[in-house]
Image (tube, rainbow, N blue to C red):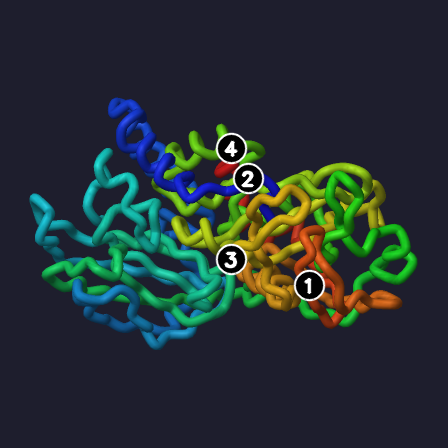
Amino acid sequence: MLARPMKKIALHLTLAIAAVAFPSHLAAQLVHENQRRQASDPQDVQNSSARHGKKRLSQEIQLTGNGNWLDCGMDVQAGEHVLLTATGKLRYADAKEDNGPEGLGRGFKDLLRVLPFNDAGRGALIGRIGDQDTAQSFLIGAQRDVLAPVSGRLSVGINQTTSDTGDGTYAVRIEIYAPEDSSTRVRVKQVTSLPGIDNQLFSKIPRRIGDKDGISGDMVNFLILGSEAAMQRVFTTAGWVKVDADAKDTVLHGILGSLSKESYLTMPMSQLYLFGRPQDYGWAHAEPISVVRSRNHLRIWKAPFEVNGEALWVGAATHDIGFERDPRNNGVTHKIDPDIDLERDYVEKTLTSTGLVGEVSHFLPDNPMKEAKTATGGTFHSNGQVLVLKLADSGRDANISTAASDKN
């Protein structure tokens, strides 16, 4: 939650600085950075010869410019290659020219347009695999070979706002290739227990985090086993964004990140304490703009001890759903959803969708916490279970998204 007072003009200030004070000659640099991000997309396999196995499914679909997303009616299995090729043209009434599946180029005046996939231009052909609430979109363009990190339904869409309508049609051919070696498929194992995750461990982990005055707040509701690099990789691959430390950096980052989902996500997150120190990382997950009133966010600390030789990360995740008065300073802070288990489950869903999680378990400690108040007085409730994720640090599962660490 945000401990410092929040003003309604914060968003408008960011937009004003971006539109007026931001040097126009840097717009080209932003576009170049956007292209670099696309090139480093961890799901992408640029060389079609990288496909392995037998063609399992194929079909052609038509996508008109008056819609956003279309369910292709094709279920993809983790580890399969999906080859998509597209042709056709769209024309927007306010555009100077037609565009193909690669979309329109994004110039300086277009940087603040909020699109379903902000790393590409308006009108680009995009796709996603899995649940619409957690699946990460990717650029298809004229051709794309995607290695599916997770099983799920394939959807394709046009990168445009709900108020946009492009005149025209894209024809999309889809081919799904099953790997010859089923062992190459990405799998997440649901297990009843993990070695070292027991009540003896939880006797060393505080149940709640607190503010600088020692007032107890949010509940510790998830653990991650894995290296720091693997921890950062799984969050960035799942679309979570590192939160900036102060307001000045936030405004600057809001401008420079205006081509990505990082826009407006990095509003400052107050420092809370565990193991006697502030969080090592803050992560947020939401769509741009709406973050001002709602975002999924969490804090995470590296434990001062290991579990069977592996680094342990201890986290507390909550979902902001509005604003409330902060009795500590009479300011305004975010109000959290009292059903915090929903946020714990959201963390599980987004991180396991990356294919970088090896094992998942839930542990119910002795004397589980089921109801309490945050540091600002808001109530929350839980079934007391703590999510435990063991990351896949080695082999193919870990290598799928190595490039994602470049985003930091």
Asked if 260 appears above or below 65 in the picture, the reply is: above
Amino acid, disc 1: Thr
- Disc 4 secondary structure class: helix
**Relative to 275, residue 159 above or below:** below
Q: Classify residue 111 as left or right of residue 274.
A: left
Q: Which amino acid, mark 3?
A: Gly
- Foreground mark, 3 or 4? 3
Q: Residue at x 33, y 37 (%)?
A: 15
For residue 197, which quarter of the picture? bottom right
Image depth: mark 2 or mark 3 in front: 3
Q: Name the residue under label 3.
A: 322
Q: Name the residue under label 1.
A: 379
In the rendered structure, which amino acid carries the disc numbered 4?
Answer: Ala
At which x and y percent is residue 82?
A: 38, 62
Circle 1 or circle 4, nearest the eye: 1
Disc 2 secondary structure class: loop
Q: Which of 94 and 363 is in front in this view?
A: 94
Q: Where is residue 140 drawn, in percent x and y? A: 30, 54
Write down the quadrant of residue 22 in the picture: top left
The answer to the question of whether label 4 and label 2 lie on touching residues, with beta carbons closer than 8 A, is yes
Residue at 65 percent of width and 67 percent of height: 341
Rendered image quadrant of residue 190: bottom right
What is the CA distance from the residue labelled 1 to the residue labelled 2?
23 Å
- For badge 2, the amino acid type reads Pro
Residue 89 in sight = yes
- Tell me which label, 1 or 2, sits earlier in the chain: 2
